[in-house]
Image (cartoon, rainbow, N blue to C red):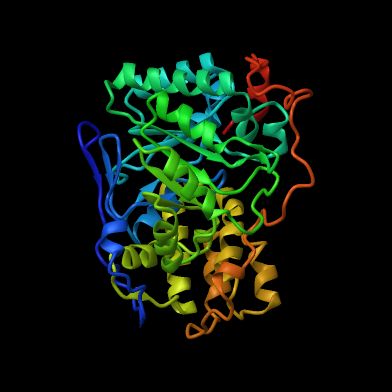
Amino acid sequence: MMHHGELYVTRSPPATRSVGLIRSVQDERVSEIAAPLRIGPITVDPPVVLAPMAGVTDAPFRRLCASFGGGLFVNQMVTARALLEGHPTSWELTRFHPDEPVRSLQLYGTDPHHLGEAVHKLVGEDLVDHLDINLGCPAPKVTRNGGGAALPYKRPLLRRVIRAVTRAAHTESGGRVPVTVKFRLGIDDEHLTFLDTGRIAEEEGVAAIALHARTALQHYAPSAHWDRIAELADTVRSIPVLGNGDVFSGDDAVRMLTETGCAGVVVGRGCLGRPWLFRELAAALAGEPVPEPPALGEVRTTILEHVRLIREWDDDPRRMAGFRKHLSWYLKGYPVGREVRQAAGHVSSADDVAALLAPLDPSLTATVDPATVVRSHSNALRRVAVPDGWLDDPDEDVHLDPEADALVSGG
């Protein structure tokens, strides 16, 4: 595996799975709008990125998604402060499988010094090939301390945070490890920050930016404002702008690229329980026929492969508890019955999973549109928790309490 010089994440070969064919998105501009994505020295083809999701995008899940189609598959968030303190759980999250061609990691923090030191360590010890900065998390425990989606409202702090990461990465790697930033529209409709965030990121040497086209107040509620992605792409012209939000199919990806002019798509909740989405995206963005959604027999095969990858990665029996949410997502939309769904929430071993799936009819097909299936975090927030006085002056150069980052230690 190559971790120096040019890195190329290419289209995966067709999966050896039984799939039917439906009409693909036919657009003579597909090959033009779906050009390979350049993030510093990394080429991503097709221009698809798996969004970092805490508790989800671990090595087994990343490898499973990559088996269906090409893209950049980002590890879940880790906290800079926790890394510097030697937190075992956080350092475990930085581990990559040898088969991963690009070691991509998302970093969280509010203190520029801690972030810079963590980057010096990660890049200096050759542990990553790409770093993403989390500036979009809407979780109250994060925003109430000025982090995540709240941080971009304070422009001086935003600049210092991005500068600390980009300079440390460049110093240690000579530009080999690019930095990207993922962020939201803003705190709410009255406090939008995405254009300022994009401009500052561009000025501070970020290699690409990704916009989740919702505010923190919207949380993960429908629908994403794709017109804002287009606005950002018109504003930030020297680096790629990626779009995130409501990509549930290959058709969605092509429409996002066509309607917004963005350079690539970021997929989050749309692939939960549906890693074959990357197969659909690869086909649609190549202008090829898109595979049909799988019948339950293929879903079962995929589930068992996911379990195998987990056991290969870490055979700790406790990991099966974390798999229960995946199992629930896999079964959503298939008419397997309430008893099976309830039992899925109690599996504790690979044998339990196999026994649960064995009696199911492999010919069953999904009965609902994947875009309508709720996959966690589906409601808007009532309010966004931010520090007292946070919204008074966006140009105030605040210095947050470094202890705030300890609240999200462990990634």
Which quadrant of the view contains residue 130? top left
Residue 305 visible in image? no
> Residue 383 location, x and y as percent?
78, 42
| Image point (61%, 48%), residue name | 214
Considering the image in quadrants, where does the N terminus appear?
A: top left
Residue 45 at what x, y percent from top left? Answer: 28, 52
Image position of 176 (left or right of 120)? left
Locate residue 388: give its quadrant: top right
Q: Residue at x 43, y 44 (%)?
A: 233
Residue at position x 25%, y 35% from top?
41
Q: Is residue 104 above or below residue 28?
A: above
Count numbered badges in the picture.
0
Quadrant containing the C terminus is top right
Name the image quarter holding residue 393.
top right
Indicate whether 392 appears above or below 307: above
Horizontally, residue 205 falls left or right of residue 58, namely left
**Above-or-below relation of 15 to 325:** below
Camera-side residue: 142 or 365? 142
At a point 46% along the width and 31% down the height, the residue shown is 199
**Camera sees residue 37:** yes
Please, is residue 48 above or below residue 114 in the view?
below
> 404 or 223: which is nearer to us?
223
Q: Position of residue 202 (x, y in %)?
A: 41, 30
Residue 320 place in picture, x, y as percent: 57, 54
